[in-house]
Image: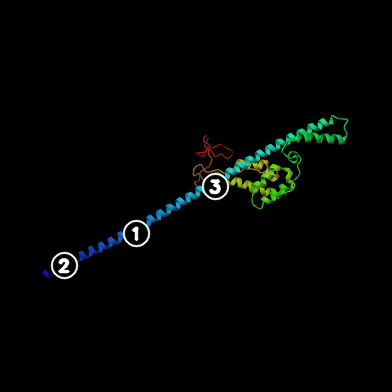
Amino acid sequence: MLGLAAFRWIWSRESKKEIEKEKKNVYKKLSFVQKELESKYRDIIVENRRMVAHLELELEKERNRTLSYRNALISQSYKLVEERRILEQERTKHQSRIGDNNQGLSRIPCLDSIGRHQLLLEVENEKTEGSDAPADYLLGDMETDEEDLYMIDHENPHRDVQMAVSILIVLGDCIKKGIDDQTQEHWYMSYIDLLQRFQLWNISNEVIKLSTCRAIHCLNQASTTLHINCSNCKRPMSNKGWICNRCRQCASMCAMCHHVVKGLFAWCQDCERG
């Protein structure tokens, strides 16, 4: 019995030593694996931060580029409107001068048709002498210039739709005869779509207003669609009814009578309640 007890004691002590030894080995392996995982995790975090910083830099560059394009479109559109206004003023002044000259010549009964024509040419030469503006530019009834058509044909393959639309708006009916209506409508729609992508709504409406194409000029006269959001879940409403399909509540409720509003109404832009 004494020998058996001694054997058990020795065996238990050796077993404890082996167990402690294995525990130490396991702890070492766990610490090594933990350190390796921590290093990999830190490397992944550093790489992700670098990627995020690079993407933020690229996004900022794209925003600046978009802003510069938008400012360029705005300045070009304003310049176009100003040039058209100046052209209209010059055309009106010149037509009024021609009308005054015709009235003055009609009061001279002694001149025949040839004499009146020569006198009209002399008066026009005196008035246009010293002016840098060409006579064809000042006349009200301008003919289609081949250089303008060449400019439009040259800019069209390069996708410079802004230049083509600018020429159409500035020259108006004078150059309209040399280009078919389908091509004009395609240019106008491409330029308007470009302006709306940059959210230049005012410039887009100004281009539609100044357009000489009948199909484009009637765009603002068509019906307008108004999309509303649910005042509860802030999501777009469907076209089926006045009840939201997601939260199952009425979208537009009157703040006074608490009934559904089915017509036009004014609402708060913060809480979207009418």
How far is disc 3 from disc 1 in space, using C-alphas?
A: 43 Å
Q: Position of residue 259 (x, y in %)?
A: 53, 38
- Residue 36 disc label: 1
How far is disc 3 from disc 2 in space, using C-alphas?
A: 82 Å
Front of the two marks 3 and 1: 3
Amino acid type of disc 2? Ile
**SS label for mark 1:** helix
Amino acid type of disc 1? Glu
Q: Is residue 1 visible?
A: no
Quadrant assignment, res 265: top right
Amino acid type of disc 3? Arg
Q: Earlier in the sequence, mark 1 or mark 2?
A: 2
Quadrant assignment, res 23: bottom left
**SS label for mark 2:** helix
- Residue 133 disc label: none
Q: Residue at x 74, y 43 (%)?
A: 174
- Quickly name the residue at label 2: 10
Front of the two marks 3 and 2: 3
